[in-house]
Image (cartoon, coloured by chain):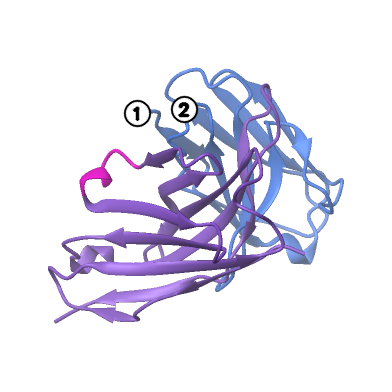
Amino acid sequence: DIQMTQSPSSLSASVGDRVTITCRASQSISSYLNWYQQKPGKAPKLLIYAASSLQSGVPSRFSGSGSGTDFTLTISSLQPEDFATYYCQQSYSTIFTFGPGTKVDIK
Amino acid sequence: QITLKESGPTLVKPTQTLTLTCTFSGFSLSTSGVGVGWIRQPPGKALEWLALIYWDDDKRYSPSLKSRLTITKDTSKNQVVLTMTNMDPVDTATYYCAHSIWFGELLGDAFDIWGQGTMVTVSS
């Protein structure tokens, strides 16, 4: 099975900061990597699919990159509504593994 | 507009079987490329993918839970049902169903629309 890891597990940042979250797969998954945002008590929301494609309606400050085993989610200028937990998820094998999450909170 | 809603018991006893229903609107599960998946999240923990059923009745399961899970669809009712046998307190979680879309050969699948989730507690 493909295992997903994320780093850091949590981070503190200020409004306006550039934030980068890393996701790593235990084997190559090409670009079959999605990113979700989840706020407390809410269902996850798809942000990025296929490593770098922005889901419709998602602000352009969110971007994704990477291929193979290493991926990055970047928030170019953190906004108050971006404080949440972010999960990566692979769809390479159709055993859709999620990463453990990265919590972004206010510094 | 696509919507999904989970329904089922909020409390089950250990060893019992859990049956959850996802009722959806705004799409057809007979449309090529479409699927419905189940994902759960124990309190304070990460998301865990459970199962997915595609428009062509192809079914995928989490390897660690495969022996306990069954996913079925009723296209005429716009419903997907997940059953999980031999429930244990560690299965206490919020269970989500989600619409899966196939973006294409080099893009893969993703869960683009989610239900609100339903909390299931396993306790005697």
Left or right position of B13 against A47: left
Q: Is residue B63 magenta?
A: yes
- Taking the spot 68% from the left edge, 28% from the top edge, the residue there is B107
Q: Which element is circle 2 on?
A: loop
Three-letter code, disc 2: Ser
- Give the total of numbered labels: 2
Q: Colour of chain B?
A: purple
Query: Dots 2 and 1: beta carbons under 8 Å?
Result: yes
Quadrant of res A32: top right
Circle 2 chain? A
Location of residue B113 in the rendering, given as x and y in whole percent from the top left corner = 66, 57
Whether residue A21 appears in this view of the structure is yes
Q: Observer-nearest residue: A76 or A90?
A: A90
Q: Observer-nearest residue: B27 or B101?
A: B27
The residue furthest front is: B76
| Residues rendered magenta in the picture | B62-67
Q: Which element is circle 1 on?
A: loop
As drawn, the label of residue A1 is 1
Which residue matches tag 2? A93
Three-letter code, disc 1: Asp
